[in-house]
Image (cartoon, rainbow, N blue to C red):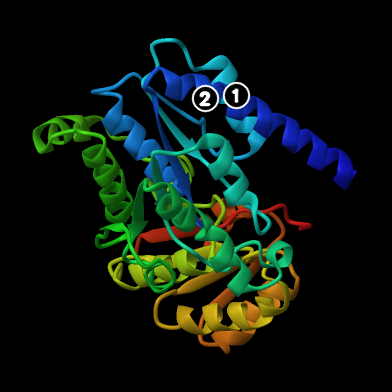
Amino acid sequence: MDLMRTVRDWLYRYWISEKIKTFHARDGRVVMVTGSYGKTSVKEMAYDLLRHKFQTVATSGNYNTAVGIAKTLRYEVSSKTELLILEVGAYHLGDISKFCRCLKPDIGVITGIARQHLVRFGSFENIITAKTEIARYMKQVGGVLIANKNDEHVVQAVAEAKWYRGEGREEINLAGAKLIAKELGMTDSEIKIALKNVRSVPNRFEMTTTRYGMRVIDDAYSSNEKGFFDALTYLEKQTKYNRILVTPGLVELGEESENVHIALGRDMIGKVDVLILVGTNERTRSIERGASGKIKVYHIGKTLEFVELVKSLKLKKEPLVLLENDVPENY
């Protein structure tokens, strides 16, 4: 099976490489976005800005594999397309380098580095090495590297880049998108006009009051350690609400899982009023250990059960629910 997957991926990358050669030959430009977190948001925001000036195509949703990129090139790129914004994921050392060689990006972007997919990478050091492969490629070919200065791991691992930064997740991601737009020739006035049409990315710290019948911060898609801690910092400030956290914990942390979840539980103290844990497993037990009985804890079997549970609670203040991560209950 691994051999078949390797052959399949090679064939897709070869096909992509040929398409990109044709695209570059007619002066098309490629932006390649990668990172442990934030890449979909930065890609989508950059697309919303750049489509006002260029004929732009971006990979759909979280398409970030060879198959997804190939589908984008096959079905969405036309002879009028001027710019490609391609999100790229990685699960092993060398994945990003392979994509760099076939996509030949004019601009490379690193959105952040976190302990995600540790089981597959083997160590956090390997994750850092893998996510910064694009930095080494851009230096080798003399291309532009854009990177998130709010992320300490990126700052430590990358020597040279055009940096963006901000306060809070959405501002940081938007800063990255704006810097990409500027590097591609958009003026400040053009960006200001285009900003009116930048959309929120669903399930990525998305504020909603209608989807669940209450005030919810939906951060359910592909959470990671850094994003989780950042979300708790935001929740800490929302003192006018009953702050409720719903989470199954984080997956694929390998041997670091227990310590990370204990640390998360400890950090929730004083920031979370009600903790609703999804499932009973090593992750949720470790979070509860970290909370040390200082937070009211409930257990549910499936994520959406939080709706009826919250409605049944006798709360003195309006609830604000943070949905942090969403994985199958039997993961």
**Residue located 51% across and 81% down the image:** 295
Left or right of 207: which side holds 118? right
Please provide percent x and percent y for residue 270. Answer: 40, 82
The quadrant of the image that shows the N terminus is: top right
Q: Distance between the residues labelled 1 and 2?
A: 5 Å
The quadrant of the image that shows the C terminus is: bottom right
Mark 1 Cα shell of 10 Å, populated few (<14), some (14-19), many (≥20): few
Q: Is residue 21 placed above or below 241 in the rendered structure?
A: above
| Res 261 quadrant in image | bottom right
State the residue lying farthest toward the top.
Answer: 79
- Residue 304, numbered label: none
Q: Name the residue under label 2.
A: 21
Q: Mark 1 points at which residue?
A: 18
Question: Residue flagged by tag 1: what amino acid is it?
Answer: Glu
Q: What element carries label 2?
A: helix
Viewer-closest of 33 and 14: 14
Can see residue 144?
Answer: yes
Q: Is residue 222 placed above or below 253 in the rendered structure?
A: above
Please provide percent x and percent y for residue 10. Answer: 73, 36
Question: Residue flagged by tag 2: what amino acid is it?
Answer: Lys
